[in-house]
Amino acid sequence: MSDLSRSVAIVGVAESDEIGKIENKSNLQLHAEAAYNAIEDAGMKPSDIDGIVTAGTSTLNTAEFMGLNKIKYTDSTSVGGSSFEIHIAHAMAAINAGYCETVLVTHGEAGRSARNRPGPNLSDPASQYEIPYGFIGMPINYSMACMRYMHLYGEERTRQALAEIAVSTRKWAIKNPKAYMKDPMTFDDYHESRWISWPFHLFDCCLVNDGGGAYIVTKKEIATSLPKKPVWVLGVSEGHDHGIISQMPDLTSTWARNTGPAALKMAGLTHDDIDLAMIYDSFTYTVLATLESLGFCKPGEGPDFVANQRTAPGGAFPMNTNGGGLSYCHTGMYGMFLVLEAVRQLRGETGERQLDDPKTCLINGTGGALSSTGTIVLAID
Amino acid sequence: MSNDYKKPIPSPQGESDFYWEKAKQEELWLRECPVNGPYFYPRDISPGAMRKDTKWIKATGNATLFTFSIVHRAPHPGFIKDVPFVTAIVQLEEGPLMPTNIVMKDPTPEKLKIGMPLKVVFEHINDKIALPKFKPA
């Protein structure tokens, strides 16, 4: 894999025209708006697209809706919110295999306002063994994983870590005009927010919004001919080790323990080389478990790693600078939005929250019930 | 048992019919792999080793609490009258982890200790299905 490093770049990123609470747009409309905006951001034309990728629906739907009918590479890999990290790996492989030249990856989800929602598949294991007991929705699943972490590493220090993550992420959101939650959050606000599913407060849980996002991956020769500087894909890794939460091999460690080191190795970088971490924050606990799994710190050391607002603006470890799924936007499959912020930070396009000339970013998506992960390392020249 | 049961109801599949038939008789049965021992949830071919020569074994119904959550916001209209209620993963005496509920009035974190002993109970939700749940032993 290492010979594919820097072989493709992300050249266009965008959200849908609006994100947040949008009452009259379908999922597919949000896909199409984001695609339009990403193609424009890249300085490309719809006819340049010959690969189409999405998650949560079939590319038959998205490509038809946008009228993209010269598709040579199609991929609807849908393994939860991490799918949009994994799609970068697939686009890299497809382009290098010669399937296509330019891949459009789209996401659209009216997580809050959709008029119609799919029901559970009754033949899935969850429908027999978890859903009847109320294991419905991710707050409950992730709460049980977090409780196990608290048991192993201490409830009080875990609680403080969750608060640190919620508060620091809100500080970033305040600097993002597109963020949904922009009221300042104090530690007391966190601790006093209502219980959703103990040990999770409301402020441990991500938002549920409407929105779309899209990015474009293309080969080196095209990337270097476009108006904006390419953001190179240095390392990729993907995988999963279970589906439903009760089958998770270790509730305190995600498959990022494999994908993190693998993506960094492919990139030829170490943890210390990373200027920005974009870590899927469906819940505060997702971040805590992921930082440890990726190897930024050892198991049980996450609370020390995030202490004293280390991940907040001005901190030594900038993380989730868009305000995250916790405070910016979370449609249901948030992984798309991690990519948008990573690319914009590397390009220097993020205004008040812009880091000082970052060159590298590690993105880690987590999907399902802490089930799947995709780790991506990006860099700009 | 009542007709106003509004929660999601399991739909047994071919490889789990026996499990649900036994649950109706208030017995908890597991599949056992000749290589890796008992496992949950039931499927004919064992996970990992992928052996076909698996068999059914009757579990004791003894377990310990592995982890839990106390649910305050009903995740489905059928659970509105139940909050707060306890979702849990328990470790069966035979080894496997199993998702379930802990049957307990007014649950608090203080009443729930990871490692606490539990015993299976069965909630008959209709004329076909009984859900195995657990209560403090």
Image (cartoon, coloured by chain):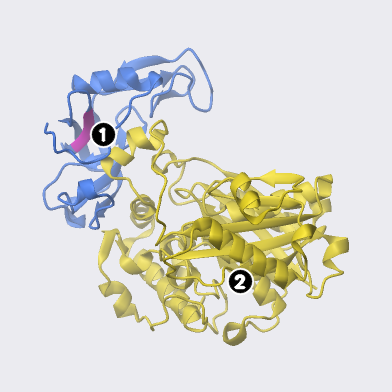
Q: Residues within 10 Å of mark 1 (few under 14, many from 20)?
A: many
Which colour is chain A painted?
Answer: yellow
Q: Relative to A178, is A148 on the left or the right?
A: left
Which amino acid is tagged 2?
Glu
Q: Which secondary structure lies at badge 1?
A: strand
Which colour is chain B painted?
Answer: blue
Pointer 1 chain: B
- Disc 2: which residue: A341
Q: Residues within 10 Å of mark 2 (few under 14, many from 20)?
A: many
Q: Nearer the viewer, residue A305 or A167?
A: A167
Is residue A76 among what the camera can see? no
- Disc 1: which residue: B63
* Quarter holding residue B22: top left
Q: Is residue B119 above or below residue B49?
A: below
Q: Nearer the viewer, residue A218 or A257?
A: A218
Q: Relative to A149, is A221 on the left or the right?
A: right
Q: Quadrant of the C terminus of chain A?
A: bottom right
